[in-house]
Image (cartoon, rainbow, N blue to C red):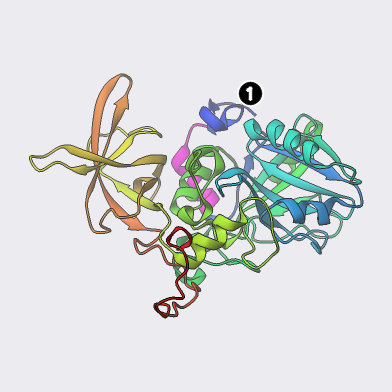
Amino acid sequence: MLSRRGAVAAAGPDAGVAWHYGDPTAEQRALSRGGAVVDQSHLGIVRVAGPDRLSWLHSITSQYLDDLAPRRSTELFVLSPQGHVEHAAGVVDDGEATWLVTERASAPALAAWLDRMKFMLRVEITDATDEWAAIGEPVAAEGAEGEPVTWHDAWPNVTGGGTRYGPAESEHPGAARPWRLVLVPRADLESEVAAREAAGWPLVGTWATEALRVEAWRPRLAREVDNRTIPHELDWLRTAVHINKGCYRGQETVARVHNLGRPPRRLVMLHLDGSQHLLPEEGAEVRLPAAGGGAGKVVGTLTSVARHHELGPIGLAVLKRNVPEDTELVVAGEVSGQPLEVTAAQEIVVPGDGMSVDRPESHGPLTPGLRGPASLI
């Protein structure tokens, strides 16, 4: 779609598709009204076939997949033994194969890891990114019988076995963001997009999708995740983790932090000062204000940034958990080689107390003599 008139190429993890087609504000408005189509062919797609696929994926990932029905979407993590996020993927099964939608840069590594883990089971893993492409639609519905394979994003609903750190679905800004990805043969991508345009949906770019994602506090693997991320920090237990399922790699960390609370970091949305007409870039430091003005101690990282058609400049950031929730922050980085400092106000996604809404009640101190060795408590 980069050959379309007015197309401006996206960069970073969205490279390969259009950032916008000449009028990003109008594109955002069309998408937020629920009538637009988005080229998402830069995403990665992994296909898992074979009769053992669901029970096998159930046993090695964070999600309950054993009885996943056809055309029912969910989400999963592959975690490290320490509980850090290594892979995240949308999941949907078509009755013959399970489709995993992830970042394009992550698809080869995810497919390779799955291939190493199959042992003697009847599964077949394929990185299908070169053969299949995703189309984004602002539709809050699963794929119906006869439609292409479709992954519906349930965010911010708390799905079966999940939990939340942030507000209930009815109070969450993500409730106003319907979203799904329709998977089509890559050779049919242009005709599928053209059919939607013929129905009155304009083609929009990733400026629009990213602005609405940030507004919805929706974490993304390529933006909010680093090598230390655990799901609790991003409120991602809503959709990608089943708290009560059996053992899987990283499960001990998931359970421990859920039970004890206080994940090391927390996600926030930032409202950025737009008076300088420049936006900091992803990766910029988030700092406390210095006593004499300007930027002080580093307390986090700006992970996503967008210019929203109604909210103005906004971003997502991952902060140390103990940063006061009412503190104004300073985002400090460089733009085109020039230093830039922008003040930012927090909107809380994960509260500073780090407690999920269904954290088990504390039973109080143990009776003296029953506490066990100090190394175990």
Q: Is residue 364 above or below residue 89?
A: below
Image quarter of the N terminus: top right
Where residue 202 appears, x then y in whole percent? 60, 43
Where residue 245 appears, x then y in whole percent? 69, 65
- Identify the residue at image location x=48%, y=50%: 212
Viewer-side residue, 95 vs 176: 95
Q: Is residue 261 left or right of residue 8?
A: left
Q: Is residue 165 above or below residue 76?
A: below
Whether residue 231 appears in this view of the structure is: yes
| Image mark count | 1
- Identify the residue at image location x=30%, y=32%: 278
Q: Secondary structure at mark 1?
A: loop
- Identify the residue at image location x=63%, y=37%: 103
Main secondary-structure element of the magenta-colored stretch: helix
Q: Residue furthest front?
A: 369
Q: Which residue is mark 1?
A: 3
Q: Is residue 190 above or below residue 136?
A: above
Whether residue 197 appears in this view of the structure is: no
Q: Is 45 in the magenta?
A: no
Crowding at label 1, few (<14), some or many (≥20) Cα neighbours within 10 Å?
A: few
Viewer-side residue, 368 vs 49: 368
The amino acid type, in three-letter code, at marker 1 is Ser
Q: Is residue 211 left or right of residue 55?
A: left
Where residue 290 appears, x then y in whole percent? 14, 41
Q: Which residues are magenta?
A: 21-32
Q: Is residue 367 left or right of residue 31?
A: left
Viewer-side residue, 171 vs 31: 171
